[in-house]
């Protein structure tokens, strides 16, 4: 059975918390009032808006608004009293039911208002007199009756059912200004491991010691929730020692349930995200064998709960089938000793609580950064005792303290925290709940609990999560504010992150947060709060049971996440979820979206980008409230998609590059659009590039395709990109297969002048030799894939002329990539500007498949001192696919790669100059014809630790270059496809630092160096021989005797 995730039933948590010593915070009331507060606030706003728009029921709406305000005032007093009376709980539950219906009613009014605006030309009153939905008079009568009934019911409820002792209180308090909330500048994930240095060292030593055993190494790390198992293993996973001793690194979050195929698929996905397809174990294993053949892997299985020995035995057997290399290691994190026991390992690591001093150091970093206030020793001592050595408590409490505006509030908060009296187990969960309670607004609390709608260990995309919060109505724009709901939502996300309620952050190359997860204990709390808010999971049945309770639950569902083989619309009727606001369908097995989708008039967010749906039904255009629509590229669209005038985000995923893609006609009518991932230009009316002109709110990334169909500079200017200040990433792409139109390409690119705020630019298949003067704006950070396929022979002054009045060229650029410029021969010196500084902040340069390029200027010489000082410049360089190598390395190596630690060189015919410019190189990989290289250039590489030489030439070397003997720090040597070599040289024994020797595909290699020479390699612990058919190193052979001292010898 698959899943329709909405929320999850979990055990009730902290039902008997002792709160007598923390009287300001009554967790019970907090748990069931903030959601109804927010819905009340929203319905009051909706009612106010509709009074201004309504025709025929203004009086009824005014009475409803008054009743809503009265309920809001009574609820405010109930919250203030903070009593724990059952009658109050029941009253809030009944109020919640009434407010739900009011919210639906007012949303229907808003829907009708939009529908009439869109359909006014199509439908005539006379023709549709008897249709409520299309006849204004009939609709007004119907809605007036509903509003009157709703207002009366709410007024009666307020007057007769109010909790004892509660009175209406009017509050003039404004919503908290989130911009005034103090936050840390460094997210908790970046703090790293504190106080576990010795444990990290011990685990590393144990892994390396176990690594010599003739078995698959498995090391469980056991500890209670919140102790920091995952944080510790992440430190080990990225540790230099692990990176040097293993070839491949895999991380899988297992969680529950423990499904073999799911875990194997996750390993496969980690190795190659593009691989997908069959769920059959045999197929997955074959793919994994291909990817891991001959490699020593380091696998982390995080958050394992399985206590069934048979399942672990089966997984272990699969892993052994994939790769019999006994040097691989698996690290498992778990809360259960029994999980560790079934793995039958000789060693396991029990994670200990943090020491008090380390707890306080962690607390200071989470709460105060470098601005440490004065805290009394008494408070500090009590607080450290309260931490109990559990990092999660430290982080969450540290996140709470962030919100304190001054020292007085800080001291008061700390004094209250130390008075909490709970057991350690309850304290963890109570601390999380307390942190949620102290969030600065009820809408933030809603955003937090909303995350329970998704599976455990779910990776939240920040932008998508914010869009879902907007779709649910959790975010309202303050009066007079010019920010967007998405801006406020992003701020909410950052606050939750700063309070340690999110973790495992993934950032893009510019440091912007893209994804995150929730710790399982924090997720438990979100689920517990959701349950108290009467959110339940009972959505999926066997298709037969449709009792009133289940149908009622489905009717009130606002979010459904459909995944894991649940064909939505087959097993579950879509009309049962009539009030849905968010619908996500994930899985290639879902191939059809039923026409009944058009009945979901409350739907705001629809994501079918990861489904197999290839065509949208015509009824989709009736979803006038839709704000976010995420589709797969190539999907067939209905003709009148432009009716979705409230659409704010239209995104298309990836598909087969050969598959044509259709855009909505007259896209210019969707003036609310903020996100548009791609726009495919056509020549027909309604599909031209001018459709982008009115879309002034576009932001983020935009790719423009088929630009050859833009006929002139004037037509390109109609896109008005120069005024779209929030677009940060642009891609301009002409089709690969087209008739040459070199002059027009230049005109079009000039017309597409971007705003000065642009940060990343990609230009693909642009055919002109010249470049527009203003295209490279000064704030550009990344210039990617300037792909010219025809005509361009040189890069000259036209490339720099945008900066003719400046002494600094490309002042902000950090990454520059040029590729597939098949005709490019020269990159000329800067002639436009004299005494200039070029690319002062460049960190990465990639030149790929420019086979005729022979000349690059030394444009980095002017700022070489900065490169020497900045150790972050160029962590990794790639240079490959040149035909010659005469002037390139003096420029590339001496001035760009001075601080590079890793260098890959592919398909160079010469290695003449410049290698001596790198002083910190650790890893070098050279692939291509080896004949003719000046190997003396390796002499300065006293820092080199890893060297891989891959011969691709037809005239293979007959012996290894003698200069390799000078690499005194070399730890790993990989020789591949040297088919001219029959014997390895004696001097190889002089590289005494060598630990790993890999010999691959050397089909004529017969002999290792002598036993005496090999015995000099005392540190050699791994010899790997792969597809060297004439080298006999089997047991009892002469060659095997030469390496008898090597613990791991693997022959494939």
Image (tube, rainbow, N blue to C red):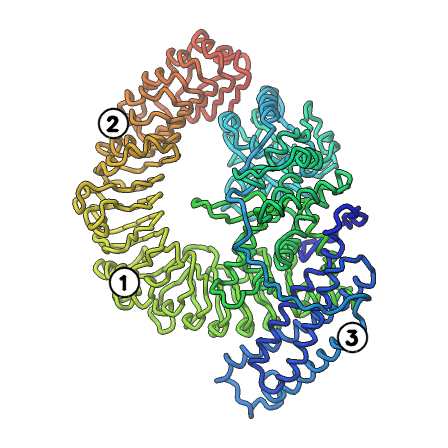
Is residue 221 placed above or below 649 in the rendered structure? above
Residue 448 shown left or right of residue 1000 in the figure: right
Q: CA distance from mark 2 to mark 1?
A: 43 Å
Q: Secondary structure at mark 1?
A: helix
Question: Nearer the N terminus, badge 1 or badge 3?
Answer: 3
Q: Secondary structure at mark 2?
A: loop
Q: Give the foreground label among 1 and 3.
A: 3
Q: Position of residue 249 (x, y in %)?
A: 53, 34
Residue 937 shown left or right of residue 151 in the figure: left
Residue 962 shown left or right of residue 125 in the figure: left
Q: Give the foreground label among 3 and 2.
A: 3
Q: Nearer the viewer, residue 873 or 880?
A: 873
Please name the residue shown 53% across and 19% down the image. 1049
Q: Nearer the viewer, residue 191 or 1033?
A: 191
Please name the residue shown 35% across and 47% down the image. 781
The answer, for residue 721, to whether it is visible in the render is yes
Q: Which mark is residue 751?
A: 1
Q: Position of residue 416 (x, y in %)?
A: 70, 44
Residue 521 shown left or right of residue 116 in the figure: right
Q: Give the foreground label among 2 and 1.
A: 1
Q: Position of residue 960 (x, y in %)?
A: 34, 19
Q: Which mark is residue 913?
A: 2
Q: Which mark is residue 159?
A: 3
Circle 1 packing at 10 Å, graded few (<14), some (14-19), many (20+), is many
Q: CA distance from mark 3 to mark 2?
A: 89 Å
CB contact under 8 Å: marks 2 and 1: no
Q: Secondary structure at mark 3?
A: helix
Question: Nearer the N terminus, badge 2 or badge 1?
Answer: 1
Q: Nearer the viewer, residue 185 or 735?
A: 185
Is residue 256 placed above or below 733 in the rendered structure? above
């Amino acid at each position: 059975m698959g899943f329709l995730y909405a929320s999850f039933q979990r055990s009730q948590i902290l039902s008997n918390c002792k709160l007598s010593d923390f009287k300001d915070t009554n967790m019970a009331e907090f748990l069931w009032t903030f959601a109804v507060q927010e819905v009340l606030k929203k319905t009051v706003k909706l009612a106010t808006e509709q009074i201004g728009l309504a025709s025929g029921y203004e009086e009824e709406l005014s009475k409803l608004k008054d009743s809503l305000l009265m309920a809001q005032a009574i609820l405010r007093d109930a919250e203030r009293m903070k009593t724990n009376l059952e009658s109050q709980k029941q009253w809030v539950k009944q109020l919640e039911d009434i407010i739900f219906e009011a919210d639906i009613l007012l949303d229907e009014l808003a829907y009708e208002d939009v529908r009439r605006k869109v359909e006014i030309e199509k439908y005539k009153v006379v023709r549709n007199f008897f249709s409520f939905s299309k006849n204004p008079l009939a609709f007004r009568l119907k809605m007036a009756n509903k509003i009157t009934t709703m207002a009366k019911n709410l007024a009666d409820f307020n007057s007769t059912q109010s909790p004892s002792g509660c009175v209406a209180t009017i509050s003039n308090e404004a919503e908290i200004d989130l911009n005034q909330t103090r936050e840390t500048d460094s997210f908790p994930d970046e703090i790293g491991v504190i106080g576990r240095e010795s444990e990290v060292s011990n685990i590393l030593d144990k892994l390396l010691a176990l690594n010599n055993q003739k078995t698959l190494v498995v090391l469980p790390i056991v500890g209670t929730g919140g102790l920091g198992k995952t944080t510790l293993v992440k430190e080990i996973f990225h540790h230099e020692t692990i990176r040097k001793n293993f070839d491949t690194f895999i991380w899988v979050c297992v969680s529950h349930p423990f499904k073999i195929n799911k875990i194997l698929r996750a390993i496969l996905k980690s190795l190659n995200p593009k691989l997908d397809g069959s769920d059959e174990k045999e197929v997955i294993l074959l793919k994994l064998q291909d990817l891991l053949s001959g490699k020593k892997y380091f696998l982390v299985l995080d958050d394992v709960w399985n206590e069934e020995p048979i399942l672990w035995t089966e997984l272990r057997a699969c892993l052994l089938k994939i790769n019999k290399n006994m040097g691989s290691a698996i690290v498992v994190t778990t809360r259960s000793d029994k999980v560790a026991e079934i793995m039958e390992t000789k060693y396991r690591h029990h994670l200990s609580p943090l020491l008090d001093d380390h707890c306080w150091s962690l607390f200071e970093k989470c709460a105060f950064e470098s601005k440490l206030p004065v805290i009394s020793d008494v408070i500090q001592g009590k607080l450290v005792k309260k931490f109990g050595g559990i990092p999660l408590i430290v982080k969450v409490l540290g996140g709470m303290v962030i919100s304190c505006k001054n020292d007085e509030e800080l001291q008061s908060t700390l004094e209250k925290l130390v008075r909490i009296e709970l057991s350690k187990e309850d304290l963890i969960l109570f601390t999380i709940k307390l942190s949620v309670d102290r969030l600065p607004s009820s809408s933030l609390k809603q955003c937090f609990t909303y995350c329970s709608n998704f599976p455990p260990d779910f990776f939240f995309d920040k932008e998508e999560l914010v869009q879902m919060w907007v779709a649910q109505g959790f975010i309202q724009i303050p009066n007079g504010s010019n920010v967007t709901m998405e801006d406020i939502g992003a701020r909410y996300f950052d606050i939750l992150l700063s309070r340690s309620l999110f973790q495992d952050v993934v950032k893009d190359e510019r440091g912007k947060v893209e994804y995150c997860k929730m710790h399982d204990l924090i997720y438990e709390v979100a689920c517990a709060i959701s349950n108290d808010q009467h959110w339940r999971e009972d959505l999926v049945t066997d298709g037969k049971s449709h009792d009133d309770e289940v149908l009622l639950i489905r009717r009130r569902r606002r979010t459904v996440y459909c995944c894991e083989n649940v064909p939505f619309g087959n097993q579950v009727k879509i009309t049962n979820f009539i009030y849905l606001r968010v619908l996500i369908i994930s899985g290639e097995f879902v191939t059809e979206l039923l026409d009944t989708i058009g009945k979901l008039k409350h739907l705001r967010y629809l994501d079918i980008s990861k489904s197999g749906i290839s065509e949208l039904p015509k009824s989709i255009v009736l979803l006038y409230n839709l704000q976010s629509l995420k589709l797969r590229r190539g999907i067939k669209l209905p003709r009148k998609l432009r009716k979705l005038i409230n659409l704010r985000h239209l995104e298309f995923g990836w598909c087969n590059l050969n598959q044509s893609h259709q855009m909505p006609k007259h896209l210019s009518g969707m003036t609310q659009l903020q996100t548009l991932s791609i726009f495919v230009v056509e020549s027909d009316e309604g599909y031209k590039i001018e459709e982008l002109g009115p879309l002034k709110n576009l932001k983020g990334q935009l790719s423009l395709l088929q630009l050859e169909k833009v006929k002139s500079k004037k037509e390109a200017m109609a896109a008005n990109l120069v005024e779209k200040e929030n677009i940060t990433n642009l891609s301009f792409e002409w089709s690969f297969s087209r008739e040459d139109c070199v002059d027009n390409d230049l005109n079009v690119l000039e017309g597409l002048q971007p705003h000065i705020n642009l940060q990343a630019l990609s230009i693909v298949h642009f055919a002109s030799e010249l470049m527009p003067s203003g295209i490279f704006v000064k704030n550009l950070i990344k210039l990617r894939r300037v792909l010219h396929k025809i005509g361009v022979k040189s890069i000259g002054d036209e490339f720099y002329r945008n900066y003719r009045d400046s002494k600094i060229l490309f002042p902000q650029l950090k990454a520059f990539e040029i590729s597939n410029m098949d005709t490019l021969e020269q990159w000329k010196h800067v002639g436009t500007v004299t005494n200039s500084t070029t690319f002062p902040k460049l960190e990465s340069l990639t030149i790929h498949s420019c086979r005729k390029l022979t000349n690059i200027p030394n444009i980095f010489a002017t700022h070489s001192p900065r490169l020497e000082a900045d150790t972050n410049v160029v962590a990794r360089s790639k240079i490959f696919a040149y035909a010659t190598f005469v002037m390139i390395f003096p420029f590339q190596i001496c001035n760009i790669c001075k601080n590079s630690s890793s260098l890959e060189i592919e398909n160079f015919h010469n290695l003449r100059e410049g290698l001596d410019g790198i002083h910190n190189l650790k890893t070098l990989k050279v692939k291509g014809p080896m004949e003719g290289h000046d190997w003396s250039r390796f002499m300065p590489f006293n820092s080199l630790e890893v060297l891989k030489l891959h011969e691709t030439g037809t005239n293979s070397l007959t012996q290894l270059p003698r200069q390799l003997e000078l690499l005194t720090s070399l730890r790993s040597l990989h020789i591949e496809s040297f088919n001219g070599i029959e014997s390895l040289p004696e001097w190889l024994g002089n590289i005494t630092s060598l630990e790993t020797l890999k010999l691959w595909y050397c089909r004529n290699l017969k002999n290792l160096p002598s036993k005496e020479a090999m015995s000099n390699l005392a540190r050699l612990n791994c010899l790997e021989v792969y597809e060297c058919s004439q080298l006999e190193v089997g047991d009892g052979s002469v060659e095997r005797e030469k390496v008898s001292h090597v613990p791991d010898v693997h022959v494939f």
